Image: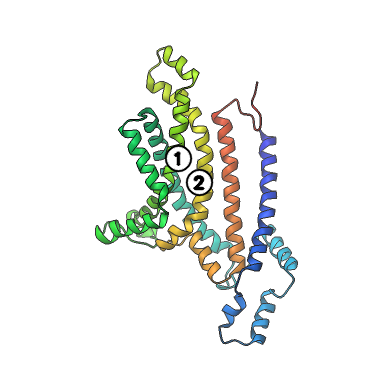
């Protein structure tokens, strides 16, 4: 197992190197020029060239990449071209806010998605199953920004129960801090819960029809024991993979929710950087999200092996 983890870590390192090249190449061909933004729309060519030389943007692309990659390897992500502050602390503060929001959404997606999927499978073709199906299809069919707007109108504007955006400070008290997390996390949860509940339902139905479940019923085991100890463990295997993919989705697509709710996370910071062509901020943010996605998949593979002892990393024991 240790050898497998080490090999996967080398694989993740290779993926991140490829991602760094792709991200750098894309930022080089992006329309716009940060020197024009810093100099202003009425600046002359000499001023723009001077700013490009000061920032090192007039060097060949491969030189700029090696400078940036060398800095990343040594822990220096450079300075934001717009804010003139180190990128590392900026990215870290925004990532902590996004990670908190994504963690809350992930826990709710995992819990309610699995519970709804199991209930739909047990009550197949009954009212509960149909209700979960309708709920899932509605959730997966409508984009997250629509639910965000609905949540703001209902809970913030009409009922006035929750704030419509921004982020609270824990020093102001628990509820003033937590109330800013409710609507964004519910929006993310409602969008993702459909995938998990539908997959859990399908996997659970297939497992409940397997021979070992029939044998367990023939032995007279209670239905609750069969579901908890025998069926659910195997039925969760594909769900674990989907949940790992959802981690990458949460951090990659959280930008829409953060923009609607004015939440100061990594998505909103990346949107700010892209609008202003702040290359070090864009490169560091995307590379961080790619790294989180890779490690989430590694954790999913390890959990996959834990829940199914027959699986040994690439082959099935005889």
Residue 177 is situated, as x and y percent measured from the top left of the image, at 36, 57
Instruction: Please tell me the numbered disc located at residue 271.
Output: none
Determine whether, in the image, residue 129 is placed left or right of residue 42.
left
Residue 196 falls left or right of residue 182: right
CA neighbours of label 1 inside 10 A, class few (<14), some (14 to 19), many (20+): many
Q: Quadrant of residue 20?
A: bottom right
Image quadrant occupied by the C terminus: top right
Q: Residue at x 69, y 54 (%)?
A: 18
Residue at screen point 55% across, 35% down: 303
Locate residue 77 relative to residue 225 in the image: left or right: right
Callout 2 environment at 10 Å: few (<14), some (14 to 19), or many (20+)? many
- Residue 189 can be seen, yes or no: no
For the residue pair 128 and 17, the one nearer the viewer reads as 128
Q: Quadrant of the N terminus?
A: top right
Image quadrant of residue 144?
bottom left
Q: Which residue is mark 1?
A: 196
Residue 6 x/y as whole percent: 69, 40
Q: Nearer the viewer, residue 310 or 265?
A: 310
Residue at 40 percent of width and 13 percent of height: 220
Q: Earlier in the sequence, mark 1 or mark 2?
A: 1
Whether residue 316 is situated above or below residue 24 in the rendered picture: above
In the picture of the structure, the residue carrying the numbered disc 2 is: 246
Kindly report the distance in space between the C-alpha atoms of the residues bearing marks 1 and 2: 9 Å
């Amino acid at each position: 197992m240790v050898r497998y983890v080490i090999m996967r870590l080398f694989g993740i390192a290779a993926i991140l190197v490829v991602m760094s090249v792709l991200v750098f190449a894309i930022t080089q061909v992006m329309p716009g020029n940060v020197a024009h933004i810093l100099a202003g729309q009425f600046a002359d060519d000499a001023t723009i060239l001077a700013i490009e030389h000061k920032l090192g943007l007039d060097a060949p692309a491969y030189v700029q990449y090696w400078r940036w990659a060398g800095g990343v390897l040594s822990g220096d992500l450079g300075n934001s071209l717009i804010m003139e502050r180190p990128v590392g602390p900026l990215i870290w503060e925004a990532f902590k806010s996004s990670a908190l929001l994504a963690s809350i959404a992930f826990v709710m997606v995992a819990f309610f998605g699995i519970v709804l999927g199991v209930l739909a499978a047990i009550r197949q073709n009954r009212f509960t199953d149909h209700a979960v199906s309708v709920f899932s299809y509605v959730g997966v069919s409508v984009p997250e920004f629509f639910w965000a707007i609905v949540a703001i109108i209902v809970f913030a504007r009409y009922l006035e129960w929750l704030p419509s955006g921004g982020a609270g400070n824990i020093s102001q008290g628990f509820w003033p801090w937590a109330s800013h997390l409710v609507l964004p996390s519910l929006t993310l949860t409602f969008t993702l819960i459909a995938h998990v509940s539908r997959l859990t339902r399908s996997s659970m139905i297939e497992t409940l029809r397997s021979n070992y479940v029939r044998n367990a019923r023939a032995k007279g085991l209670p239905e609750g024991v069969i579901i908890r100890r025998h069926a659910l463990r195997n039925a969760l295997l594909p769900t674990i993979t989907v949940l790992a993919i959802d981690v990458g989705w949460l951090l990659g697509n959280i930008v829409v929710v953060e923009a609607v709710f004015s939440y100061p996370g990594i998505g909103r910071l990346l949107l700010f950087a892209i609008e202003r062509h702040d290359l070090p901020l864009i490169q560091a943010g995307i590379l961080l999200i790619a790294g989180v996605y890779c490690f989430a998949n590694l954790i999913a593979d390890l959990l996959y092996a834990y829940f199914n002892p027959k699986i040994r990393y690439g082959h099935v024991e005889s």
